[in-house]
Amino acid sequence: MNAHAAPARIERLTVKNFRAMASVDIRDFTPLTVLLGPNGSGKSTVFDVFAFLSECFQSGLRQAWDRRGRARELKTRGRTGPIMIEIKYREQSTAPKSPLITYHIEIEEVNGRPLVKREWLHWSRKGRGKPFRFMEYENGTGRVVSGEMPDEQDQREEVPL
C-alpha cells in the first residue's frame, strides 16, 4: 500500500450465525461508526468478527476456531447452517471510482473441524454491471485469478486450500 494512500474503508458488514449475531446487516459505515445497544446485543461481537477474520488470515482458521470454543461457542445457539461473514469495502476510501470489493466466507464444523464451505471475492471495476469473481472456493477447491487488477481476460488458476 502506498504510504500516502487512504486506508481501505468498510461500507457494509453482513453476519449470520456468529455468536449473538443470528442475522445482522450493518450498512453505511462512516469513518466514525458508533454501535449502541443493551448488554448482550452483539456490540462486542462486531469487533470479534474482525478479530476472528484477522486471526484466520494470520494464524489459520483452525487456531481462530479452536481459540473461540469451536462451533459450540461460535455459532448462534438454536440456529442451523454455516457461519457467514460478508464484508463490502473499497481499497481506497477517497477515490471516487475505487471498486466496491465483496469478501464472503461460510464456515461449518465437520467432524469437529472447521470447513470453509464457500469463500469468494469479487468486484465491479467499472462500478456497474455484473461483479467479476476473481477468487472462488467451495469445500476446499477452487480457483483464483492472479494479478494486481484481475479481470475477465486474466487466466484462472486452480489452487487448493
Image: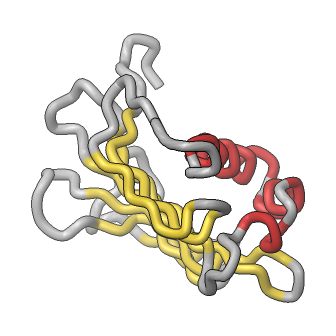
Corner quadrant of residue 89 = top left
Give the residue drawn at x 43%, y 51%.
Answer: 147
Q: Find residue 93 and report its horizontal and vertical position in percent.
A: 30, 29
Residue 29 image-quadrant placement: top left
Q: Which quadrant would residue 119 be assigned to in this image?
A: bottom right
Q: Is residue 97 left or right of residue 90?
A: left
Residue at the location (86% across, 56% down)? 63
Residue at position x 63%, y 64% in the image: 18
Residue 70 at x, y = what percent?
A: 83, 67
Residue 144 visible here: no
Coloring scheme of the render?
A: secondary structure
Please give the name of the residue rendered at 21% of the width and 28% of the height, measured from the top-left corner: 95
Depth check, front residue: 59 or 87: 87
* Between 103 and 111, the one nearer to me in the picture: 111
On the image, the x and y values in percent for residue 150 come to 35, 56
Above or below — where is 47 with respect to 152? above
Q: Is residue 32 visible?
A: yes
Q: Is residue 125 left or right of residue 54?
A: left
Rendered position, 138 above or below 148: below
